Image (cartoon, grey):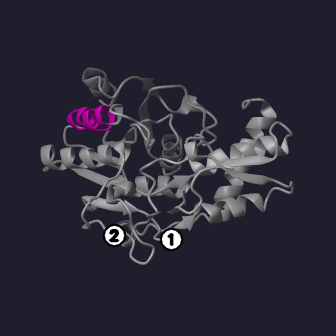
Amino acid sequence: MKVFITGICGFVGPWVARELIERGHEVTGLAMFQPNSPAISDWSRIPYVTGDILDADGVSRAMESATHVLHLAGISTSKAGDEARRINVDGTRTILKAANGRRTVLASSGYVYGPTSSDRPAREDDALNPMGEYAVSKAGMEAMAQAEFASADVVIARAFNHTGPGQSTAFFVPAMCEQLAKIQAGKQFPMLSVGNLEASREMLDVRDVARAYADLLACVKPPRVVNIACGKPHTMQELLKNLLATVHVPISVTRDPARSAPSDLPCSTGDPSLLRQATGWTPEVPLETTLRDTLNWWKERVRAGSVR
């Protein structure tokens, strides 16, 4: 395959690029900023251009040689505002028009389901109930793709929460890891500022999610809509407890309401059965490894002076 990745310099893009290259495929991409990821050590191996997914002519030129498209670019935070719809819906329309029938995997989100239950993880045929601007924009992206590109080779991948080295501190695990790394280095008072610790989320490893995207790109007959999930959520309290167990420094924890969003869901988890049936994919990286690797990446950044 010759895979064109939008958002190739973001969090997930470099890990998918690495996975595809290791499988023997060619990778090109589109980015809005320079890369800063531990996934790729030599970016000279990956030709990418800097551009805007709303630039139809630029996108068409950039993906001219591609046989497959993975659309990761978009706004991914819950506090995105009206910009989320413009980028996540209108930008996706631009990508699908440029793809012109080539296999395209769209990165959606498990948040389109709204609240779920650990007793009954969300399935692809469940009704959508998005809460918050980000989830609403992703549901709108899906509706647009289904209505306007019904006959195209499009896969909508609803990825549930994932983390790992390279993710920004807009998300829970890296936010905690950055603070812990600073505390251990003596650059922060030994007190953690946290949001809602009762919320329950899946926490897949980004490397497992990268494998899922690569599998869907290569799948002969993929589902039209598919969860990237494990069906095993963890509370934020559990994740924090696991992280604190690796840091041998007394640390106090304080609640900061600013770290919680009104659209925070009590639980978000999905059923991975359809993806497993279609591709054989199953998560491989243990949660402990994900947390350790993420914390170690932040420790290296603090030691190198990349974080103030």
Residue at the disc numbered 1:
232
Decide if residue 65 is in sight here.
no
- Residue 16's x, y, as percent? 48, 47
- Extent of the magenta region: 85-98
Q: Disc 2 residue type?
A: Leu
Q: Nearer the viewer, residue 193 or 70?
A: 193
Residue at horizontal 35 percent and vertical 50 percent from the top: 108
Which is more toward the observer, 61 or 288?
288
Residue contact at pointers 1 and 2, CB within 8 angstroms: no
The residue carrying mark 2 is 274
91 inside magenta stretch:
yes
Magenta-highlighted stretch: main secondary structure?
Answer: helix
Q: Residue 290: horizontal and vertical position, in percent?
A: 64, 57
Foreground of the two, 129 or 150: 129
**Residue at 86% from the left image edge and 39% from the top image edge:** 186
In the picture shown, does residue 110 fall above or below 36? below
